[in-house]
Amino acid sequence: MNKIYSVGIIGAGISGVVTALQLADNGIESVLFEQKNSIINGPPFCHLHAGGNLYPDISDNECRLLLKQSIEMARLFPHSIDKRPTFISVPKSEIYNTSDIENRLNMITEYYYELIENDQYNEVLNSAGNYYKAYTESELKQLLQLPTVNNPESLDEWMINAVKLIDIEKLKTPVFMVQEYGWNMFRTAAQAQLALNNTNICELKTNTPVTKINDVRNKKLGYNWEIYTENEIYKVHYLVNSSGYMTGKIEEPLMINNERLIEFKAAYVSRWEPQPGLLPEFIFHGERGTPHGMAQLTPYAEHYYQIHGMTNEITLFKNGLVCSHGNNIQPTFDNEINQKIWGNWDKSETQSRTQKAIEYVSRFVPSFHSATPGAQPLYGVQQVRGKSLSRRVGEVSFPTKMYARCEIIKASSALTVANNIICKLAEEGIYNGSVPILKQNELLNNILKSEVDILASEIAAKRGYPKAMARLVVEKKKEGNGRRSSN
């Protein structure tokens, strides 16, 4: 193949896809490789992480960055955002103080005010004055007397529905209702796929594993890298490694070294019909990896619920966390974990872990014991640069010329990664345009919600999940062809 691309991107996860879309929006030609038959396959995500509310131990700076990045991604993928809040609580058995959580929520609220002052279109998590509300035990008991609200809108109405199900006596008060929204992976994949289909500036190659990379930077060939697939050789000026947990496999033969952790985790799908009214997401904080790690219950449409339990019996796995060492740049899992990565789950283990997840949530939501397994697990592998698992924010590094390594930990960092890569392309002389600012991506902006509805359902079904999981819990009232522009 004689064509020379400006950028070659290996891996069409959320980072690779958003990078390709941002490149296209800025007129930069790229070729995007994905070994699977569709884009954005995992690790799965289900909420924005707008403010770091699920991580009591991270720094305030990381919380602010997560809020900013989550708002940016919500603006980029509006048809994927489920506008339902999250119930945040601390069990009485845990060391976390509710006063610390409230202080942090106040800090996040102040920063949210700042972001809205800088750009009115950042007000995507309701108004800053309604970002969260704290509830004392007496206030919860008063709400308990009020009737269920089928389609709640205010934080109080969401809390009315929630308090009818939780065991208040097991929780410290106050508890909190926070405008931490859901983020639907199937819908994100659909909107991105539709946008990529509408451009000829990015050439998407699905079902196309990369077999080898040749570094030809010093050979004066008019390009810098050769990307080998089974049938073709692609020539590119700039290489973006967005391979996720397999990043090291690309880097080993190129002798680009970097310490990293990779971790396999899973969430479980259940079905439960508790009451007519819609429910928020539920978070019950706990220390990760202990028998009382955080419990998380995420609602989907038609009474499907996703469960995380941050224990070794549920979401975490023995030998599920491995690190690079010595000359082995790519960490490796044992055969048991590798089988799961490729979808070969033992049915009895799936049943057992799902049932344990149901029982785990039932400690705080007693009626949830009637839930039943609803589908196969949602699972994936997360990469963390270095050796600190406590790190929740990762972006992009440039360890050598004409090369970028994507290192996102949370999907909300993807736009930051893409824009940093464009800045680097300008620095390397490949891009002559202006440095990108936060603006609407026109390719994504022109996608209709109705188009996303159809394709997202197809994607969910092809991956073995109920089509209902591709729908929003809180359906938008109006059809639109995108959003207001903030250019």
Image (cartoon, rainbow, N blue to C red):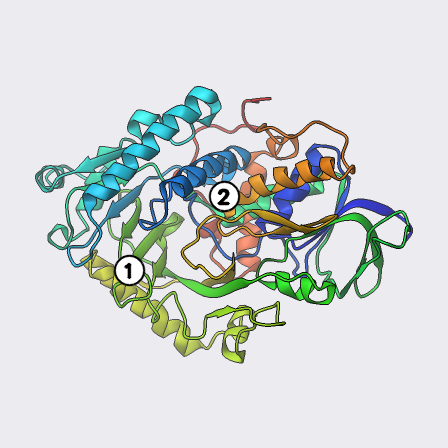
Q: Residues within 10 Å of mark 1 (few under 14, many from 20)?
A: some
Q: Quadrant of residue 93?
A: bottom left
* Distance of label 2 from label 1 (alpha carbons): 23 Å
Which residue position holds label 2? 412
Q: Is residue 346 visible?
A: yes
Q: Nearer the viewer, residue 269 or 137?
A: 137
- Residue at (86% x, 47% y) in the render: 4
Mark 2 or 1, nearer chain start: 1
- Residue at (35% x, 74% y) in the render: 352
x then y, percent, for residue 106: 28, 33
Q: Quadrant of the N terminus?
A: bottom right
Q: Nearer the viewer, residue 154 or 53?
A: 53
Q: Amino acid at mark 2?
A: Ser
Please state which of the two labelled residues, at mark 2 or mark 1, is closer to the viewer: 1
Q: Is residue 130 left or right of residue 140?
A: right
Q: Amino acid at mark 1?
A: Glu
x then y, percent, for residue 23: 70, 38
Q: Nearer the viewer, residue 159 or 4?
A: 4
- Residue at (66% x, 66% y) in the render: 249
x then y, percent, for residue 380: 50, 62
Which residue position holds label 1? 287
Q: Is residue 370 visible?
A: no
Q: Are marks 2 and 1 in contact (CB under 8 Å)?
A: no
Q: Residues within 10 Å of mark 2 (few under 14, many from 20)?
A: many
From this view, report whether residue 349 is shown above or below residue 439. below
